[in-house]
Every structure is written in structure tokens, then in C-alpha cells.
Image: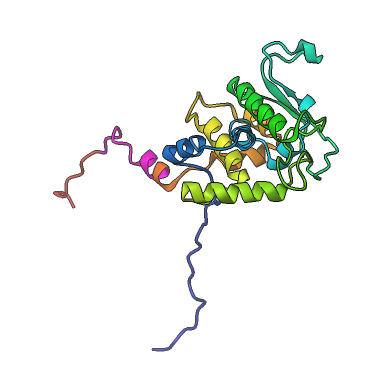
């Protein structure tokens, strides 16, 4: 009898990639859209939620980038239907678009924008500021809305909703909704890549994340019938 030294046997554990945070509960998404917000903030939330824009892209938008008519030829644009042109404007708030693209918008956002414009005129007058989103009160009224103001807004939204929410969560949520077909028919992966402004399809693949429950449900399909093995011959 003798002792033999050997390396400790270790079992490799595989960590699945962590899915980005999104509003997975329909009740949470409904609660967000049902919040009573001032028109400017309502339009910002809806733009981030329905178009999947990055917050920097929204804050850098100029009024001329929004084409909200069924026929946009009066704007010199041949793209039909409401849409937004994400371009690299030189915005005074330092916000910049990360990728250039055209993103279609729901027709309802045209009404939301009109309400935001009426509110803007009521607070700062018929100003000529180019930005879509501007501060409405305080010493910076009429100037391009800052990212710090948006952070404060989403801090307030988190308190109202009872859970933490950030601007990018709305982008994650929209991407997941598109790919899973939660509120529409599932959208092709490459189409979602273009809508989000991803250069690589690998960036879009993170939104195909599956929950532990959905993985378990897939392999526990009740339609699969396993043969019944008898212990008699064991």
C-alpha cells in the first residue's frame, strides 16, 4: 500500500453570457407607457422605446431630422411614412449619433411630437433652436437638453415605477421585442441589426438571449413521448 499524489480533479463550469437588462414583464412595459409625463419627456421615452435609439442619438436630433408625414416629399425626402434620420449633428450638448441610419416610427409619435412642440412654445416661445429636445425651465431654458437632465428624469421614472430603469434598457427592450415577436411578428435578425445601427451581427445576437425558463420549457416539451422501459430485464 502506498499513497499517490495527483492533481485535484476539477469540473469546468460554463457560464452562459449574461443577457442585457430589459423590461421582460408586460405589466412593467405597460406601466412605463402609462406614466403621466410632461409632453417632452413623453416623446423622449416613446422615441427610445419604439425606435430603439441610443439616448445620445435622441439628444443629438435636430428638428429637420424628424419626418413625420405619410408623404415626406415636402421635406425633400423620398422615404415614405414617419421616420427619423439619425445623423451626426454638431449638437451643443455634446451628444453624437454613433451610427447613421433611417428608422421608421409609429404614426402615433407624430401626435406625441406635436404635443411636445406645443409645450415647448408655451415655455420658451417660438425659438429657433435646432435640437428636438431642449430644457424648458431654469437658466438653460431653450438650450439643448443635457444628458444629466435625462439621468434625473429616469431616476424619477424609477421611483414612480418601483424598479430601476435606464435609457438603454428601453433600447434593449425594443430589440428583444422585435426579435421575439412579443408585440408583432418576429423581425429578421439582420433587419434588427440595421434598425439598431449595429455594424456587426454579433452585436445584435446578444438580444436573442433566452431565459432559463424558456430553455427548460424547450427540452420539457410534453409532446415528446419517451418509451417506457421495463425494469424486468434489468
Counting from the top left corner in percent of width and height, residue 4 is at 47, 84
Q: Is residue 12 depicted above or below 191 in this figure?
A: below
Counting from the top left corner in percent of width and height, residue 102 is at 73, 25
User: Who is closer to the viewer here, 178 or 47?
Assistant: 47
57 relative position to 115: left or right: right
Counting from the top left corner in percent of width and height, residue 6 is at 50, 79
- Taking the spot 69% from the left edge, 15% from the top edge, the residue there is 69
Counting from the top left corner in percent of width and height, residue 56 is at 73, 42
The range drawn in magenta is 215-226
Q: Is residue 181 depicted above or below 155 in this figure?
A: above
User: Who is closer to the viewer here, 219 or 115?
Assistant: 115
Q: Quadrant of residue 73?
A: top right
- Taking the spot 73% from the left edge, 47% from the top edge, the residue there is 138
Q: Quadrant of residue 142?
A: top right
Quadrant location of the N terminus? bottom left
User: Who is closer to the viewer here, 109 or 103?
Assistant: 109
User: Who is closer to the viewer here, 223 or 140?
Assistant: 140
Color encoding of the figure: rainbow
178 relative position to 119: left or right: left
Q: Quadrant of residue 83?
A: top right
Give the farthest residue toward the left: 232
Q: How many marks?
A: 0
- Taking the spot 63% from the left edge, 31% from the top edge, the residue there is 51
Residue 143 sits inside the magenta stretch: no
Q: Is residue 118 depicted above or below 93 in this figure?
A: above
- Taking the spot 81% from the left edge, 32% from the top edge, the residue there is 130
Amino acid at each position: 500500500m502506498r499513497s499517490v499524489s495527483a492533481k485535484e480533479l476539477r469540473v469546468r463550469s460554463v457560464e452562459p453570457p449574461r443577457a442585457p437588462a430589459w423590461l421582460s414583464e408586460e405589466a412593467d412595459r405597460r406601466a412605463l407607457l402609462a406614466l403621466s409625463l410632461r409632453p417632452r419627456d413623453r416623446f423622449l421615452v416613446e422615441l427610445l422605446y419604439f425606435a430603439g435609439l441610443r439616448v445620445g442619438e435622441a439628444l443629438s436630433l435636430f428638428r429637420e431630422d424628424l419626418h413625420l408625414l405619410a408623404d415626406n416629399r415636402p421635406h425633400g425626402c423620398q422615404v415614405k411614412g414617419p421616420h427619423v434620420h439619425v445623423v451626426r449633428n454638431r449638437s451643443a450638448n455634446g451628444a453624437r449619433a454613433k451610427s447613421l441610419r433611417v428608422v421608421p416610427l409609429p404614426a402615433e409619435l407624430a401626435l406625441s411630437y406635436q404635443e411636445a412642440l406645443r409645450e415647448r412654445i408655451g415655455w420658451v416661445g417660438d425659438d429657433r433652436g435646432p435640437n428636438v429636445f431642449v430644457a424648458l425651465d431654469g437658466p438653460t431654458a431653450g438650450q439643448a437638453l443635457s444628458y444629466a437632465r435625462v439621468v434625473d428624469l429616469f431616476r424619477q421614472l424609477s421611483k414612480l415605477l418601483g424598479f430601476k430603469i435606464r435609457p438603454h434598457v428601453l433600447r434593449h427592450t425594443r430589440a428583444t421585442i422585435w426579435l421575439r415577436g412579443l408585440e408583432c411578428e418576429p423581425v429578421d435578425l439582420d433587419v434588427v441589426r440595421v434598425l439598431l445601427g449595429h455594424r456587426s451581427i454579433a452585436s445584435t445576437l446578444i438580444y436573442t438571449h433566452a431565459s432559463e425558463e424558456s430553455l427548460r420549457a424547450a427540452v420539457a416539451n410534453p409532446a415528446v413521448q419517451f418509451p417506457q422501459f421495463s425494469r424486468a430485464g434489468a
